[in-house]
Image (cartoon, helix red, strand yellow):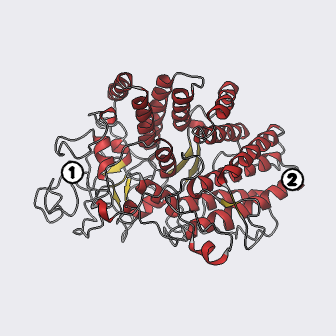
Amino acid sequence: MMIVFIITSCGSDFFDINTDPNNPSEANPALILPAIQTAYVSATLRNVNRASAALVDQLHDANYGRWDIRESQFNDDWNGFYADALQDIEILIGKAEESALPGYLGSAKLQKAYIYSILVDLWGDVPFSEALQSDNPVYDKGEDIYPTILALIDEALTDLSNYDSNPLDISSASDIIYNGDIDKWIMMGNSLKLKMLNQMRLVDPAGVTGEINTLIAGGDLISSNGDDFQFYFGSGIAPQNAHPRWVDDYNAGGRSGYFSNHFFIKLTGGSDRKPEDYLNLSPNVQYGIKDPRLRYYFFRQALSQPEGSPNIPCEFNQVDCFYFYTGNGYLGRDRGDNSVGPADVAVSTKWGVYPAGGLFDADNAKPLTVNDGTGQGIHPMITNFMVKFIMAEAALTLGTNGDPRTLLEEGMRASISKVMAFGESRDNVSADYRPTTSDIDLYINTVLGKYDAADNEGKLEIIIDQAYVANFGNGIESYNNYRRTGYPVLKPVVDNNEAGPFPVRLIYVVDEIGANKNVPADKMITVPVFWDK
């Protein structure tokens, strides 16, 4: 399902909606809801998602990859969450209550809960009880906000249970995410609750165990790829409504970003072109086999680079090279490398068909242009595979219902099938390069063999490592998992002595620091959020 909305650029004003979402003339729910959904996805994809992915070494960023987090970097994101999305949600809630529209009411509350859960996960203490009511709202503690969010989810689920197909209620045309499907909103609410409960397992293991089991027994969780809570992009250039990463990589004048060499090597299985000590990770997650999602995630603009070429000065020599070339055309950078390398716009590896709506890699390397791909990507927020990995983690660590090994396998298969189906819906995937059933089974059985041989800690590492690979496109969830579990194990920053302390939360933004006297002075990026023990 696609919807047309307006985007101006891939910078700080990434989305720009036809009707001012903060001043709707008639508070029409059918106009407010898509404005809300566009606003919070816009806020997420400006910098917080990019920063999170760079912090866990999926994307390369010279600043975030060196843990250089500044007050100005997330200003537009913060304002997008509060001034745009949350403000409109309050308008929608009021209109839905006034007009007795439980579909709009319940979905608005669930999206409010999702946004605040992200804010707490990223910043810890944030404005909540007085948010949007004062120029100087107090900062509520994250551990106090989470229970209130969980209660809000329950409220929303009650609202949705009262839905009676009122034709004026939530319409398919107004709902970019679920096309007005109330049953899917209910599954999203329960799955969000599951995610938050598991997030708290280190601080309240006894309390969350029973609640997780209740959710599992209820059965109303996201359980198929068709239920996924995700945002759909269009393919427009003028007006622009395509996926921002496709805009970055497929338009003239862009294509300046890099992926992480660490992530390349993980998905390629550890090419024999790399030095043996490059990854230096736990043997649990060195599978030695190509990931079936590789050609869907990345598109190579060149299949190889000869040693000593103008683009690749040398290989496997960190002293003389601008960056570490992993081989086979997968050209990225090492974690935190801030050197100025040669111009490589036409040869560096870019976003593929999943999730950005670019091209499938069929060894058809070429410099990318705006005529390649469609930009009809997605932003996955809570998915079937994510639910399976969460349930696997909880079963392993808390003893909740379900077999963690079975759930791990279900999560892997759900991710691979989602990526393949999406890729084939957006590009011509040649049968010569499409993973076969045997390819997929070999990969999954290799991972499960590692799982069977590992102790419990190693099993947890494998579950989180597979979630890390599957969550490509959603760096926030990988950043959450890394802080909660310590996995995946990551390569140190290049010139590690120059890197600051690893940020276990994001820094408060410059607008708040300058205008709100209640911004906590003692919350530094080295102080964990409440669920991160």
On screen, residue 58 versus residue 190, left or right, reads left
Q: Answer with left or right where residue 307 lies relative to residue 68.
A: left
Q: Name the residue under label 2.
A: 97
Is 325 on the left or on the right of 163, as rendered? left
Q: Position of residue 388 (x, y in %)?
A: 53, 32
The mark lying in front, picked from 1 and 2, is: 2
Mark number displayed over residue 303: 1
- Residue 531: x and y in percent read 58, 46
Drawn side of residue 338 relative to residue 509, left or right: left
Above-or-below relation of 132 to 460: below
Q: What element carries label 1?
A: loop
Q: How crowded is mark 2: few (under 14 residues within 10 Å), some or many (20 or more)?
A: few
Residue lying farthest to the front in this orientation? 522
Furthest-left residue in this view:
308
Which is more toward the observer, 41 or 363?
41
Q: Is residue 455 above or below residue 299?
A: above
Seen from the viewer's position, the closer of residues 284 and 406 is 284
* Between discs 1 and 2, the one toward the N terminus: 2
Under mark 2, the amino acid is: Glu
- Residue 367 position (above or below residue 452): below
Can see residue 370? no
Closest to the observer, 247 or 364 = 247
Q: What residue type is labelled 1?
A: Leu
Residue 398 at what x, y percent from top left?
57, 29
The image quadrant that residue 37 belongs to is bottom right
Nearest to the observer: residue 205 or residue 404:
205
| Mark 1 vs mark 2, CA separation in Å | 57 Å
